[in-house]
Amino acid sequence: MFSKTRVTEPGPRSQPTTNYDTESSRPMDTSYDLPAHQPRRNGPSVLSADLTVKGDIRTEGDAQIEGTVEGDIRAHQLTVGESATIRGEIVAEEVIVNGRVVGRVRGLKVRLSATARVEGDIVHKTIAIESGAHFEGSVQRQEDPLGNGQTPKLAAPSYAAEKADANV
């Protein structure tokens, strides 16, 4: 009367079923993938405190560095942990520094926490420096600090500085 097909038996496999919209009887779009130009954002990639990297790091996602990096870093968002040391250029849309950076920092948003130690220039669109942060270098605001890898020009000396030099 009734027979069951065993799942383990070889044979033709059924095709995936199509979901239909009950009101219009049209197939529903069940693809929920992000567009190709938007990378999936999971949690940040983390380099632990006992890890040392010699070389450049590049990601379209977020990164959190707790160890030592001797090289340039490019990311969407970069967090430099309190125990971290970066020796190289940082380029990211958002940079949060809690540890030590020796080199240039370029970002749309740059934040130096109270535990930050930065020795190098900062090129930014917006910046926040907490009380207690240690910073040696110059700060320059630009509309596009990420600028396709172009080196930003240093600000020209002011007229007052030129005049003071001429009077000496």
Image (cartoon, rainbow, N blue to C red):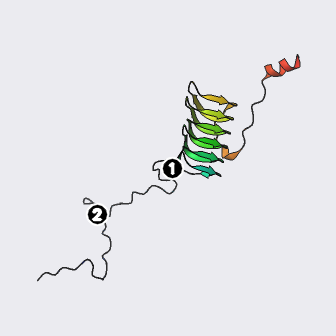
Answer whether residue 68 is visible to the viewer in this image.
Answer: yes
Which residue occupies 75% across, 37% down? 153
Give, as a three-letter code, the residue at label 1: Ser
What crowding class fits label 1: few (fewer than 14 Cα within 10 Å), some (14-19), or many (20 or more)? Answer: few
* Secondary structure at numbered mark 2: loop
Q: Which mark is residue 20?
A: 2
Q: Position of residue 104 (x, y in %)?
A: 68, 39
Position of the C terminus, as image quadrant, is top right
Residue 90 vs residue 22, the one in the foreground: 90
Q: Quadrant of residue 81?
A: top right
166 relative to 1, above or below = above
Which residue occupies 55% across, 31% down? 113
Q: Residue furthest top?
A: 167
Indicate which disc, 1 or 2, sits on the residue closer to the N terminus: 2
Which residue occupies 68% across, 32% down? 140
Q: Which mark is residue 45?
A: 1
98 relative to 52, above or below = above
Front: mark 1 or 2: 1
Q: Position of residue 106 (x, y in %)?
A: 64, 39
Residue 107 vs residue 117, the one in the foreground: 117
